Amino acid sequence: MMKTLVFDVYGDFGHFKKFYTTSSPLTFAFPPPPTVRGMLGAIIGVDKNDYLDVLSHDKCKIAVRILSPVKKIRMGLNHINTKGNYWIPAKKGSHEARTQIRTEFLKNPAYRLYVCHEDDQIQNRFVENIRSHKTVYTLSLGLSELLADFKFVGLSEFTERKNGEGHITTVIPMSVIDEYGITFEKDKKYFKEKIAMEMTRDRVVERYEDVIFEVQGKTIYARTNIYWEDEKGERIIFF
Amino acid sequence: MKYLYRSGAANGADLSPTAKLSGKPEGTFDRKILGWFNILDDKKTKLTDAEKIFLNGIRDVLKENAGFIKREILTIREKTPKKEGIVVTLKIKNQDLTKYVGDFPVFREFLKKQVNDKAFSISAANKMCSICGEKKATVFGNLDTYAFYTLDKPGYITGGFDEAKAWRNFPVCPECKLALEEGKKFVESNLTFKFCGIRYNLIPKFILGEYGISDEIIDIFTNTSRIVSLKQKVMERIANDDEEILDVLKDLNDVITLNFLFIQKSNAAERILLNIEDVFPSRIRKIFDIKHEVDYVYNSNFTFGTIRNFFSKSDPNKRDYDLDGYFLDIVDRIFKDRPVSFYFVLQFIMKKIRDEFINDRYFYLSVRNGMMSVSFLEKLELIKMEEDIMEESIFDGMFKKYGPAFETPLKRGLFLLGSLTELLLRKQYKERSSKPFMKNLKSLKMSERDFKSLLPEVQNKLEEYDSFDKGKRMLAAEASNYLLQAGDNWKMPVDEMNFYFACGMNLVNDVADIIYPDKKVAEQELGQEEANQ
């Protein structure tokens, strides 16, 4: 049994940059686990150098559910042009002062996060802060400009179960799915993305994984070798 | 492999002593072939004594015979047709044995070293590769397969702007780097298409991997025709392919989606103009279905090019296509089933229509294209038309044919007024070979007040020409009736009012069929303008 905090985060815009794009940034459909850990760090105020350690994969379990259909739009962002490692505030030769980067954003993103930390003290700090709508650092959806709001949903007891089949509400790492264990249903749109799963405190990714999700936020019927179920029968997969 | 060619910097040598012959053949030899051996003068070059002797020997021979070689190159160049390219390489003969550059390990190793030199500048040992997901002895951090991943600005380096640690962002092992490069080549040579003149890569995505997917489907992605557009012939084939894919997928219990990657290349930079991700074949099929419907109604061939007409250049005199962004956004919305702003699209349609109208060029064609585009978007339910319950009218059948585009009294009134005006213009043209009344149409920028005063003006003029016959009276009465129903303060943008008016001008034939049941009379009234359409 795992006492799990369930809460929603949402905002007007979000951007979770795909790691393989720099000059034309594209966004993931949902925050990858290291990003979620960063958000959790902001909520209880863990230093940016420590959060990947304090909230590491083996200490803090997280699951992400997409609540609103994933919508992506593009906008131009005006950056200062630091090409060649320096910035000249005015145009000089071919060096423009600024550069416009067309960036992909998520519009009206909303996610339900499931968080379970092994340290009761930390877990309680999460619950307290979320309940009283407080954070230590400002919460944002990927970029500091994209502010996020959040809402306490509840505390649930999730039980770990092995080998089962059913509707799963969260995004699912491919590794837990049995071979051809997904039932593709009509009117559902399935997408797959490779994301960083585990990151060390010095920001080195230890594990990448393909994750499958339904883009409209609907459930996925899958046969998995592990899942977690609460008293209401909701099935989720922790990363 | 035996020539071991790989291009280097534009002004420097290539990565092996093999070069493509350029404008000045003799220069190519000096710069590229002999130039390659300059690495022998570089102190950083690490070579064994045997290798040094071997390479120096070749260089000496080449230098000694430079004059002869260059003359030979020139002779061969002159003898060969200009359009045929020539590659210059070394061939080393030792008695009966002939060897090429690629046969010597020293050239191969140098090439590999040069290729990976840049990559090695930002790399790490024993780290996880982000592509294969395995721990590898070396991972590179500055991949340049696609130029939309660059580290040329510190802001691109997440986690501290530290270039030396940039490998943490996107670590790729040498094997995956090679696979990526090969993949890019494959996509560029097989899966690159043009969409209304804009290049894109079509990248299929198999949700559960390739396993179990028949070769037939893989084949579809390598042998599809080069131009993906909604042109009839190609379309049918794509539609068929589409069905095949779905059919097979159904049995395979697998899912395929399509990514359309529009990349703009400018010099060395590559920017993602648009990445339409995960389009289901069924959506493409729906787009084709709607295209068919539009084709049927307008008896024409609707393609994305029809929309492109309005979204290419903001000014026809401009050199560059500056509306690509808008066009691609509309394409994105069509593929992803997201709403389109009617007024936004209309603004560009009217701009083009006015331009053609003022310059007396392809006005009718533009109006038709505009109507087809609006109809296409409307049928895809991307724009929503206002609809009112309408009184019965003799024109009902005609309006119904065009869907909900004309389902309010005001739209119908403007449309019929447009037709009536067109009949007057044709009459004028028939009588005096010019259309002086056109100036009353204010370059199609008429306001509510203009339209209200236009009807009596048109009627008057028709009287003057003694042409206000029964049919036209009926048309004027209907137009007036609808405009009266619309009341005052129309609350419709000028662009939209003029659009419906232009539609009426364009579809005057449909109207004439109704008001003149006698075909001969209709033809006479329409005059020779018909031939211009």
Image: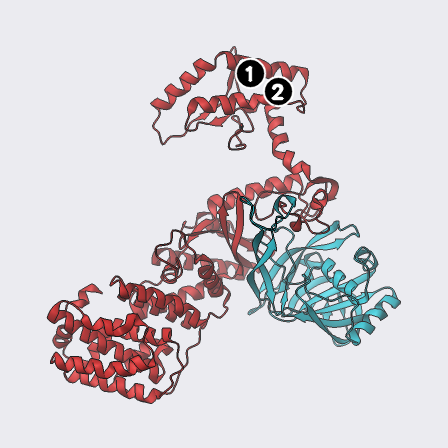
Chain colours: A cyan, B red
> Could you tell me if the residues under marks 1 and 2 are in contact, i.e. CB atoms within 8 Å?
yes
Q: Is residue A69 left or right of residue A232?
A: left
Which comes sooner in the sequence, label 1 or label 2? 2
Q: Residues within 10 Å of mark 1 (few under 14, many from 20)?
A: some
| Disc 1/disc 2 C-alpha distance (Å) | 10 Å
Q: Which mark is residue B59?
A: 1
In percent of the image, x 84 and y 68: which residue is there? A123
Q: Which mark is residue A138?
A: none
Q: Residues within 10 Å of mark 2 (few under 14, many from 20)?
A: some
**Secondary structure category for the residue under label 2:** helix
When asked about the image quadrant of residue B344, the answer is bottom left
Give the amino acid type for the residue marked by disc 1 in the picture. Answer: Arg
Q: Position of residue A119 (x, y in %)?
A: 87, 64
Residue occupied by mark 2: B40
1 and 2 marks on the same chain: yes
**Secondary structure category for the residue under label 1:** helix
Q: Position of residue B220 (x, y in %)?
A: 46, 51
In percent of the image, x 12 and y 73: which residue is there? B524
Q: Is residue B139 above or below residue B234?
A: above
Taking depth in this image into account, of B371 and B268 the one nearest to the observer is B268
Q: Position of residue A211 (x, y in %)?
A: 66, 58
Q: Is residue A5 left or right of residue B180?
A: right
Q: On what subunit does the disc labeled 1 rest? A: B
Q: Is residue B521 left or right of residue B497?
A: left
Q: Position of residue B447 (x, y in %)?
A: 34, 78
Image quarter hosting the C terminus of chain B: bottom left
In percent of the image, x 53 and y 62: which residue is there? B250
